[in-house]
Amino acid sequence: MNRPMVRTATGIVALISLLAIGTSFYMHVEKWGMLDSLLNSASIIATLGYSPDFYPQTDLGKIFTVFYMFIGIGVVLSIVMSLGSIYIKEVSKIEHQSFSKSDKLFEKVKRDMLIRKYKHANRQH
């Protein structure tokens, strides 16, 4: 398995773990329901921001959220960069294959032109 794929898989596992940690934290510290806790955790990581009516009330919740936000955003950016790396690698592979085919075609056309030129020159003598 190549490095970008491993980094992407690791990032996805880290993201799922972060969502579970955030959900559990908000359920226990802020006393929110599971769905509200998950929604808030995902909103923070996805940088959607807080709802004016729905944000941590406790000091511990606010402090946790600051650190959770930076770690979560870092994980998401890591996943995006890994996916970008995979995409660029695949596009480069496709372009290389296309150039290789067009180079072969160009060489064949050039060879055919030289053969025709040689035959034409031999006919004139």
Image (cartoon, helix red, strand yellow):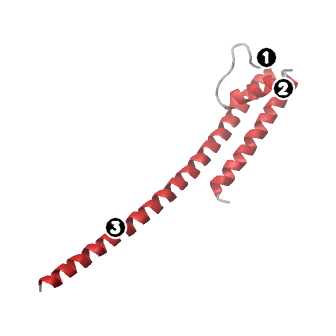
First of labels 3, 1 by sequence position: 1
Q: Amino acid at mark 1?
A: Gln
Marks 1 and 3: in contact by CB < 8 Å?
Answer: no
Q: Which mark is residue 106?
A: 3
Q: Residue furthest front?
A: 123
Q: Amino acid at mark 2?
A: Met
Q: CA distance from mark 2 to mark 1?
A: 17 Å
Q: Amino acid at mark 3?
A: Phe
Q: Secondary structure at mark 1?
A: loop
Q: Nearer the viewer, residue 102 or 120?
A: 120
Query: Crowding at label 2, few (<14), some or many (≥20) Cα neighbours within 10 Å?
Result: some
Q: Secondary structure at mark 3?
A: helix
For image coordinates 67% across by 48% down, the residue present is: 8
User: To which residue does mark 2 refer?
Assistant: 34
Corner quadrant of residue 33: top right
User: To which residue does mark 1 refer?
Assistant: 57
Q: CA distance from mark 3 to mark 1?
A: 69 Å
For image coordinates 83% across by 21% down, the residue present is: 30
**Viewer-side label of 3, 2:** 3
Corner quadrant of residue 22: top right
Q: Nearer the viewer, residue 103 or 27?
A: 103
Note whether 58 is above or below 83 in the view shown.
above
What is the x, y in percent for residue 48? 64, 25
For image coordinates 37% across by 67% down, the residue present is: 105
